[in-house]
Image (spheres, grey):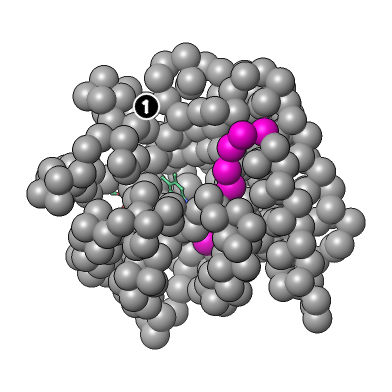
């Protein structure tokens, strides 16, 4: 019931101004975002790697309409990748990139700007010995994100994509991307989408997730199973055995701070597990989507807003 208003708020400038006044050190923010600086991101990454996890880092930001801001985001990724390489962390750490953070929504030439900016990040990732996965945003960006993926993969075939099981089109997109060398992260989807394009009921989304899992796990690509849902994790594990997939030919992914015990349990069971670690000052939209998924965290959130701690 609270999901829709929270997702609406995730794009409201007025609510953003109020919520962004909570310091990043406040419990509710810190439990989802390790910090604002590269140092914070690197420290969190080193700690996770020490525990046997792999990492994907997201420099927070989205919906940029300003070319300078888009370029600043690219520079932040390039500096991050250099630092990961220097710290010896890039073998176990890749980066996740939102195309609207590097200019996709800029009027007239957004597609071209985002493609060129993403190319720069892919080149920096290649130089650091790692890869990029393109996050997937709301459905109005799906076609352009997949088109940019196709272009990037001509030079950087290791580039990964995200597909969202709530979209009605996604089983077809999974078929198109289930080929050799293709890295696909399957998630349920985090945006408020209209009924015409997306399943609305949890049961329908879960059924679609399982259909997509079947396509990806029986295919020749590298599936990245991004969910905290115990049922989906169990189903994915049994489908992996059914299709004769060895551990390491697919991976599980979860968000930083969510179900850390389960992340460690899967590592102990020999699975490859990657934590998605967001960092930076632009944590507002990300945090609101997490609250929409788990409204029971709203009490902690309101407490942080009142006490600003
Ligand atoms: P869902 O929210 O349906 O919950 C199912 C069950 O999982 C719950 O009943 C509970 O048992 C367990 N659970 C879920 N959250 C929990 C929590 N906080 N604490 C404890 N238990 C919890 N989305 C998108 O649109 N584009 C993208 O690019 C990405 N990228 C991405 C990367 C990674 C690595 C992950 C894990 C997720 C994303 N997402 C995303 C977000 C994704 O679409 C989805 O919104 C969230 O993962 C929540 O869906 P779940 O599958 O986790 O289960």
User: Is residue 54 shown to the viewer in this render?
Assistant: yes
Q: Position of residue 260 (x, y in %)?
A: 37, 27
Asked which secondary structure carries label 1, the reply is helix
Identify the residue under disc 1: 260
Residue range in magenta is 128-136
User: Is residue 262 shown to the viewer in this render?
Assistant: no
Residue at the image position 65 percent from the left and 41 percent from the top: 126
- Residue in front for this viewpoint, 72 or 283: 72
Quarter of the figure with the N terminus: bottom left
Q: Position of residue 176 (x, y in %)?
A: 38, 71
The answer as to whether callout 1 falls within 8 Å of ligand 1 is no
* The stretch drawn in magenta includes residue 131: yes
Residue at the image position 67 percent from the left and 33 percent from the top: 128
- Residue in front for this viewpoint, 19 or 187: 187
Q: Position of residue 63 (x, y in %)?
A: 70, 62
Residue at the image position 21 percent from the left and 65 percent from the top: 211
**Mark 1, other Cα within 10 Å: few <14 / some 14–19 / many ≥20:** some
197 horizontally vs 55: left or right: left
- Residue in front for this viewpoint, 292 or 151: 151
Q: Position of residue 275 (x, y in %)?
A: 45, 34
Residue at the image position 74 percent from the left and 30 percent from the top: 82
Quarter of the figure with the C terminus: top right
39 horizontally vs 166: left or right: right
252 horizontally vs 85: left or right: left
């Amino acid at each position: 019931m609270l999901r829709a208003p929270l997702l609406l708020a995730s794009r409201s400038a007025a609510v953003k101004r109020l919520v962004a006044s909570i310091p990043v050190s406040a419990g509710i923010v810190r439990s989802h975002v390790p910090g604002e600086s590269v140092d914070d991101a690197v420290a969190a990454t080193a700690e996770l790697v020490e525990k046997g996890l792999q990492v994907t880092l997201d420099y927070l930001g989205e919906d940029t309409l300003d070319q300078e801001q888009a370029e600043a985001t690219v520079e932040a990724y390039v500096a991050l990748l250099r630092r990961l390489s220097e710290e010896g962390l890039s073998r176990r750490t890749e980066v996740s990139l939102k195309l609207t953070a590097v200019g996709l929504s800029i009027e007239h030439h957004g597609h071209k700007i985002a493609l060129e900016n993403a190319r720069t990040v892919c080149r920096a990732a290649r130089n650091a010995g790692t890869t990029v996965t393109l996050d997937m945003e709301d459905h109005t960006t799906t076609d352009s994100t997949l088109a940019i993926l196709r272009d990037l993969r001509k030079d950087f075939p290791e580039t990964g994509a995200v597909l969202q099981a709530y979209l009605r089109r996604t089983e077809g997109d999974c078929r198109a991307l289930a080929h050799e060398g293709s890295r696909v992260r399957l998630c349920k989807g985090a945006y408020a989408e209209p009924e015409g394009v997306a399943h609305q009921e949890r049961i329908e989304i879960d059924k679609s997730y399982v259909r997509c899992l079947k396509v990806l796990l029986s295919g020749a690509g590298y599936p990245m199973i991004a969910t905290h849902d115990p049922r989906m994790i169990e189903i994915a594990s049994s489908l992996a055995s059914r299709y004769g997939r060895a551990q390491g030919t697919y991976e599980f992914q979860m968000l930083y701070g969510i179900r850390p015990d389960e992340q460690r349990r899967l590592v102990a069971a020999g699975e490859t597990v990657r934590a998605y670690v967001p960092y930076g000052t632009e944590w507002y939209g990300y945090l609101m989507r997490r609250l929409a998924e788990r409204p029971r965290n709203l009490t902690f959130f309101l407490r942080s807003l009142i006490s600003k701690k």
